Image (cartoon, grey):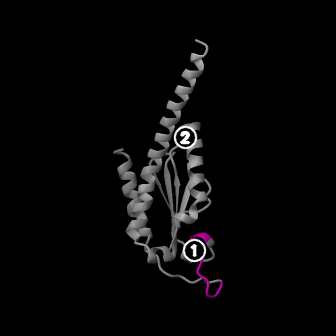
Amino acid sequence: MSSLRPYLVAVRSTLTAAMALENFASQVVERHNKPEVEAGTSIEALLNPLVISRNEKEQVLIEPSINSVRMSIRIKQQDDIERILCHKFTRFMMMRAENFVILRRKPVTGYDISFLITNFHAETMLKHKLVDFIIQFMEEVDKEISETRLSLNARARIVAESYLATFG
């Protein structure tokens, strides 16, 4: 857990800096305001994307723009069981994206889950609470997958023992 702390501190400080969002009308369509990080219509409105890596299996991609920030997370997956659990968990979350407001329905390619924070979210919600939510999500998702894996292994052991007891 101690090696997780510097990673989360780096993500928190980078995300907090990227949250300096402002209202920015579209330069292509009059009276429209689309998240520039998604639309990509104005290259000058996009800032440099940042990748923060804990290791090769755990990464965060932060793509800031003038009016939005897209944050994508690659969750640690050691083996096939963790890959399946991660896929099921993230799919469950993304199917309920409207309840989480900032959660995208589809992650960025190469990542497991993505969040999109617009200037409207930053104006209506507390910025530090948005950052706290994402950091807490990052802490909890690893814990949740590990606990589910332990539960799955315990259940498999019980099933195997009861199955083998019928022969012995």
Residue at 54% in and 72% down: 46
Q: Amino acid at mark 2?
A: Glu
Query: 5 or 122: nearer the eye?
Result: 122
Where are the magenta residues, as a range?
29-38
Q: Which residue is mark 2?
A: 82
Residue at 53% in and 35% down: 152
Question: Quarter holding the C terminus?
Answer: top right
User: In x, y percent, where is residue 53?
Assistant: 46, 51
Sequence-wise, the earlier of marks 1 and 2 is 1
Circle 2 — which element? Answer: helix
Residue 90 forms part of the magenta stretch: no
Q: Which is the main secondary structure of the residues drawn in magenta?
A: loop
The quarter of the picture where residue 132 lies is bottom left
User: In x, y percent, where is residue 45?
Assistant: 54, 76
Q: Which residue is mark 1?
A: 35
Query: 166 or 135: nearer the eye?
Result: 166
